[in-house]
Image (tube, rainbow, N blue to C red):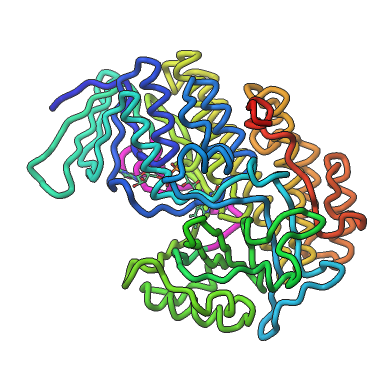
Amino acid sequence: MNALFDAVIVGSSFAGSILGKILAKNGWRVAVVDRASHPRFAIGESSTPTADFLLAYLADRWQMPELRPLAAWGTWKETYPEITCGKKRGFTYFAHSPDRTFRNCPDHSTSLMVAASQTDYWSDTQWLRSDVDTFFARQSVASGCELFENVGIEDVCRDDSIWRVRIMDRGSEKNTRNLKARWLIDAGGGGDFSQRWLGNQRDDDWMKTQTASFFGHFTGVKGFADQLNPTSPIDPVSGFCADDSAQHHVAANGWMWMLRFDSGVTSVGIVQPTQFWKTIGTVSEGLQVWNRWIEQYPSIKELLSNAHPLEAGEGALRWSDRLSRCRRRAVGDGWLQLPTAYGFVDPLHSTGIAHALSGVLRIAELLVAEGTVDSSQSARWVAYDDQLRREIEWIDLLVGGCYRSLPSFPTFCAFAAWYFVAAIQFERAMARDPSLWSNGYLSCEINPMKEKARLSYQQLMSQSEESNIESIRRAIEPWNDVGLLTPVSGQRIPHTAPPKYSVRLNAKC
Ligand SMILES: Cc1cc2nc3c(=O)[nH]c(=O)nc-3n(C[C@H](O)[C@H](O)[C@H](O)COP(=O)(O)OP(=O)(O)OC[C@H]3O[C@@H](n4cnc5c(N)ncnc54)[C@H](O)[C@@H]3O)c2cc1C
């Protein structure tokens, strides 16, 4: 086989598959290649209002109504009950201290609940990625992409503006194919495709956030809402059950996520600074560190007391070394990267899915709508490259400031308010006009906001806890109309997102 395509996309995860589908629907001949085959485990499961907004808009913009139901929990369950997801009404944060049972104080000083959706039906979702990515990969094929799964990339070169990509079936060395294409698109997430084949080195010593993670899927994880309030699972002010959330159990230097799927499976992972994990060489050593960490926190231990990893043996838990990464460039002659192939910070604030979708949106506009052909010379591609760097820097600041705030839980929550105001402003801008992002992804072009957040970051080490919280409260004021850090709202925020895009345009609202 020596086929000529318009684009070869490396990575058949949701982002590569959606981009492939859009290109194929618009007459491009597209090959999508992946070293794995669906269904397969993938991490990165918690969507956000931003992610759902982008998914619904992509579905409308490129006439893909079959993707739209996945933008809200209710429409998802009605349309695709066989694709596993979980209900996510918002973000929750709980402070845990060593050897002490979690206590929910009357002033909520040990917890924070931020609603992101007003009803269950329109809520965000936790994506069981093995199911979701399989769905998107099939969708790309249904629209005309050729999907090559379970293949290794053996060689990549370029002559006369045509890429030549040699792929080989991982099971059979005899089965080799040569794919030719005008465009090479790296949708390989944390894979090292661009380093190996395009010489695109890492450039991330500057990143503030340096964490690593250990994670897996479990059955039998208990609910936390009972520990929070034994009389009612629904929090009266924020209006949702803490188990229907991206649950952050925050400890001295890091945190544990719990994301519950409707199937009874829960995604659980610990994120800690890289030095915390430095003794780990094998998964079993990681497991020992995991067990010791859990042992310290009685309420977390209780949540996991009947939990069992979904998979047996070595695959039960997975280890991801330093999470933050960034490449030198996101575009070059005839090649480009999706945001998460270019850079990533950390799971805190769940920015990854939305960032990947924002890249699909931008690349589709540039390639299809504008027909921008030469990636090295077009000002629009240079702008995309520059934008991605500013976005990663901004997310790094928003996330890094939270880690820097620890072990003070109140300061952690105060710094997290920078993320919330940035996300809220971005969602509002998208609600006004989804095609126009004058303030950038997650508001990263609002310079006064960035400058003030940077100052908050710098002050973290030099001010008292009270001064940090007070100065962040004052600094976020111009963008804070949802009551973050205000005594009236306390640590319960009933509503942050603007009306969901799906709600606005759907007859059921
Ligand atoms: C521990 C952790 C937790 C996270 N939690 C969240 C969260 O809760 N919410 C959120 O929004 N985001 C989260 N993220 C981020 C999220 O995982 C990513 O943003 C998302 O997966 C990016 O999607 P993608 O399609 O770009 O790439 P990926 O999902 O990484 O997919 C890449 C695909 O490319 C394939 N591939 C890679 N290299 C090659 C190669 N050389 N050749 C062939 N195929 C290749 C892989 O097999 C894979 O199928 C998390 C990330 C981590 C590490």
- Main SS category, magenta section: loop
Q: Residue at x 68, y 61 (%)?
A: 242
Q: Residue at x 25, y 31 (%)?
A: 157
Residue 175 on the magenta segment: no
Decide if residue 275 is in sight here. Answer: yes
Q: Is residue 258 above or below residue 120?
A: below
Q: Residue at x 51, y 24 (%)?
A: 381
User: Picture coordinates of residue 321 (x, y %)?
Assistant: 45, 62
Q: Residue at x 70, y 33 (%)?
A: 445
Decide if residue 408 is in sight here. Answer: no
Q: How many marks?
A: 0
Front-most of 106 and 450?
106
User: Picture coordinates of residue 62 (x, y %)?
Assistant: 49, 20
Q: Which residues are magenta?
A: 186-211
The quadrant of the rendering that contains the C terminus is top right
The quadrant of the rendering that contains the N terminus is top left
Front-most of 507 and 197?
507
User: In this view, which residue lies farthest toward the right?
Assistant: 488
Front-most of 52 and 265?
265
